[in-house]
Image: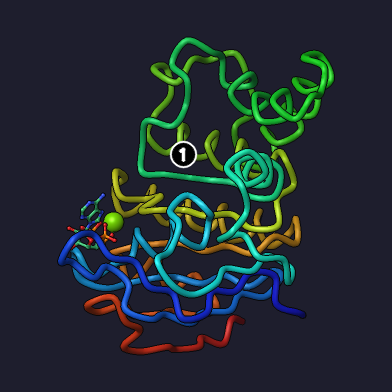
């Protein structure tokens, strides 16, 4: 499988703080990569830089060989909407919209008519164990259910890469295991790559590879053999 997303020599500074001190990373299609490391080591900065949310001060980010780090803001945000999906710790669903419309929203932003987008969105509910919850608002869902709706929303645009920052951070151990299994398997099924930040070694163990970040550098890279 060829490289989908790559960062080379990534540097990011905030004043006198060096959040990224020259990071190289490559992600292939269907590959899942967990980013681990102490608080403040640069994990979120790395994820946001790879996702084109933060612009690096040095180095390059390439999506299928095309540079992102020097694209204009409009092209970059259009590309993020179309090619990337995002799952965060919490607070990403719009509270006033039913679950199915939350999932349909990225498709509508891409220009799909509301009806068609909702029909497409509904297809994700059964595979993610959300059957019957289409009309619930986020406040009427459990934390694990809300995260599964967020996964559906990230995958609905059929992205090249799904980015997740502590996707299970607000969940108990058992729910966290269920959510991470669904996130990794559903992402792999669509052919997308997954880049995920987590503090939880059990969660990271569901990924193909684990990258350890320390003081803005990669301190270790390990490869799991996924059965
Ligand atoms: N917007 C910002 N302005 C100034 N400094 C920042 C900013 N964002 C991050 N930093 C600093 O950059 C470093 C890396 O931050 P980052 O958020 O990437 O860490 P992290 O590994 O995700 O930590 P955590 O596990 O606590 O989420 C930290 O020293 C942080 O204080
Ligand atoms: Mg972080």
Q: Name the spot of residue 90 as percent of width and height, x first.
A: 36, 36
Give the answer, above or below, for where 103 lies relative to 88.
Answer: above
Which residue carries the number 1 mark? Answer: 147
Residue 63 image-quadrant placement: bottom right
Give the answer, above or below, for where 17 lies relative to 102.
Answer: below
Q: Name the spot of residue 52 as percent of width and height, x first.
A: 53, 54
Total of numbered circles in the picture?
A: 1
Furthest residue toward left: 16
Q: Is residue 47 left or right of residue 198?
A: right
Furthest residue toward top: 96
Q: Name the spot of residue 149 as percent of width and height, x first.
A: 55, 33
Pick whichever, 216 or 133, lies toward us.
216
Name the residue located 47 percent from the left edge and 49 percent from the top edge.
Answer: 53
Q: Quadrant of the N terminus?
A: bottom right
Q: Is residue 202 left or right of residue 62?
A: left
Q: Is residue 87 left or right of residue 113?
A: left
Pick whichever, 158 or 175, lies toward us.
158
Q: Quadrant of ligand 2?
A: bottom left
Name the residue located 31 percent from the left edge and 82 percent from the top edge.
Answer: 217
Name the residue located 79 percent from the left edge and 24 percent from the top edge.
Answer: 111
Per the image, label 1 sits on a secondary structure element best described as helix
Q: Name the spot of residue 185 as percent of width and height, x first.
A: 63, 59
């Amino acid at each position: 499988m060829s490289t989908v997303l790559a960062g080379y020599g990534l540097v990011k500074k905030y004043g006198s703080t060096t959040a990224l001190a020259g990071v190289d990373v490559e992600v292939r299609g269907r590959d899942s990569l967990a980013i681990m490391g102490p608080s403040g080591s640069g994990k979120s900065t790395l994820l946001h830089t790879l996702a084109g949310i933060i612009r690096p001060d040095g180095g390059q980010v390439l999506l299928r060989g095309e540079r992102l780090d020097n694209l204009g803001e409009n092209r970059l945000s259009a590309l993020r909407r179309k090619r990337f999906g995002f799952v965060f710790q919490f607070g990403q669903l719009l509270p006033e919209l039913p679950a199915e419309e939350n999932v349909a929203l990225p498709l509508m932003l891409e220009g799909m008519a509301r009806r068609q987008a909702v029909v497409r969105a509904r297809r994700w509910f059964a595979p993610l164990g959300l059957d019957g919850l289409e009309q619930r608002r986020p406040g009427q869902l459990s934390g694990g259910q809300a995260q599964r709706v967020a996964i559906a929303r990230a995958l609905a645009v059929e992205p090249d890469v799904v980015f997740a920052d502590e996707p299970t951070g607000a969940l108990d151990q058992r729910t966290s295991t269920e959510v991470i299994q669904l996130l990794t398997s559903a992402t792999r099924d669509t052919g997308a790559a997954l880049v995920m930040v987590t503090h939880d070694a059990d969660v990271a163990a569901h990924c193909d590879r684990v990258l350890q970040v320390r003081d803005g550098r990669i301190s270790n890279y390990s490869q799991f053999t996924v059965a």
